Image (spheres, coloured by chain):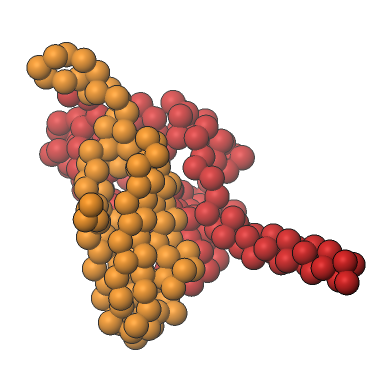
């Protein structure tokens, strides 16, 4: 399956500005199905990690209070063109997704 | 011969353990207890060991005054404090106040943004953990339509 993570990186000198958008329902567990009235089970990303050349540059711990189809942005130093940035997440059901992009 | 092989094996195990440490330190386990807490102070105590954070003007918390849609509230936190370890966002009146926590390794700038859900009008607090302690900044965000239920 193709990755449902989009990531954009802007290099300014050795600072990399990372913006990432991923598709995930982020269900709180308190919402009800409008047709059946059944509670939709909780389903959310727990950990999101950004690695530059294998080194963790950001680790995000998420609750259900992160919006559906989460968006994150941050910056890190020590980046250069040609570096490989990997984004990966796991959710409370053990599902996961990841994507890699080359800087520059 | 046997002895040297054993030494080699022990050496490799020790080396593997050493290599595993830095990543374990950066990527701490998902703090289940803090995320399950139903009060802001409880969540902070579970996460940091204390609910006392010093208000700091060095933290800039950017959030809308009025969020029309509580399901998507853009929040960004930036600070000039040094040696930042983590940035957490706490929404006082959400059913589970701790929304998100960013672990900041050395080299990463303490300047993060994301979008969160808010059930109702509430104080939103950014809690910044540095080597010197806990610091915070807060802002009230008015919510017109809540984003936690249906």
> Could you tell me residue B61's position as x and y percent?
34, 54
Q: Is residue B57 visible?
A: no
Along the line of sight, the residue nearer the viewer: B86 or B17? B17
Locate the C terminus of chain B and report the quarter of the image it occupies.
top left
* Residue occupying the point 24% across, 43% down: A24
> Could you tell me residue B47's position as x and y percent?
54, 41
Left/right of residue B9 with respect to residue B77 in the rendered view: right
Residue B97 falls in image quadrant:
top left
* Residue occupying the point 35% across, 60% down: A87
* Residue occupying the point 36% across, 56% down: A88
Q: Does B140 sit above or below residue A59?
A: above
Locate the N terminus of chain B and report the quarter of the image it occupies.
bottom right
> Could you tell me residue B134's position as x and y percent?
55, 51
Residue B117 falls in image quadrant:
top left
Colour of chain B in the rendered structure image = red
Residue furthest toward the left? Answer: A35
Colour of chain A in the rendered structure image = orange
Q: Is residue B69 visible?
A: yes
* Residue occupying the point 52% across, 54% down: B27
Q: Does B101 sit above or below residue B84?
A: above
Residue furthest toward the top? Answer: A37
Count of labels in the image: 0
Along the line of sight, the residue nearer the viewer: A41 or B139? A41
């Amino acid at each position: 399956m193709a990755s449902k993570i989009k990531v954009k990186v802007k290099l300014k000198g050795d600072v990399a500005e990372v913006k990432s958008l991923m598709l995930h329902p982020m269900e709180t567990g308190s919402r009800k199905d409008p047709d059946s009235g059944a509670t939709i089970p909780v389903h959310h990303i727990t950990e999101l990690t950004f690695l530059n050349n294998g080194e963790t540059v950001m680790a995000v711990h998420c609750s259900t209070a992160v919006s559906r189809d989460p968006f994150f942005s941050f910056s890190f130093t020590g980046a250069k063109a040609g570096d490989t940035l990997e984004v990966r997440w796991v959710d409370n059901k053990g599902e996961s997704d990841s994507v890699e992009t080359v800087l520059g | 011969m046997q002895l040297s092989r054993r030494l080699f094996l022990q050496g490799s195990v020790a080396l593997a353990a050493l290599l595993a440490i830095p990543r374990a330190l950066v990527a701490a386990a998902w703090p289940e207890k803090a995320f399950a807490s139903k009060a802001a102070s409880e969540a902070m105590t579970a996460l940091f060991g204390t609910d006392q954070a010093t208000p700091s003007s060095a933290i800039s918390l950017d959030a809308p005054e009025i969020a029309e849609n509580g399901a998507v509230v853009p929040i960004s936190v930036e600070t000039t404090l040094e040696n930042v370890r983590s940035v957490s966002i706490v929404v006082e009146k959400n059913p589970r106040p701790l929304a998100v926590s960013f672990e900041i390794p050395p080299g990463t700038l303490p300047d993060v943004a994301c979008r969160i859900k808010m059930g109702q009008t509430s104080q939103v607090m950014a809690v910044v953990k540095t080597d010197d302690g806990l610091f915070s900044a807060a802002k009230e965000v008015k919510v017109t339509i809540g984003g936690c239920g249906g």
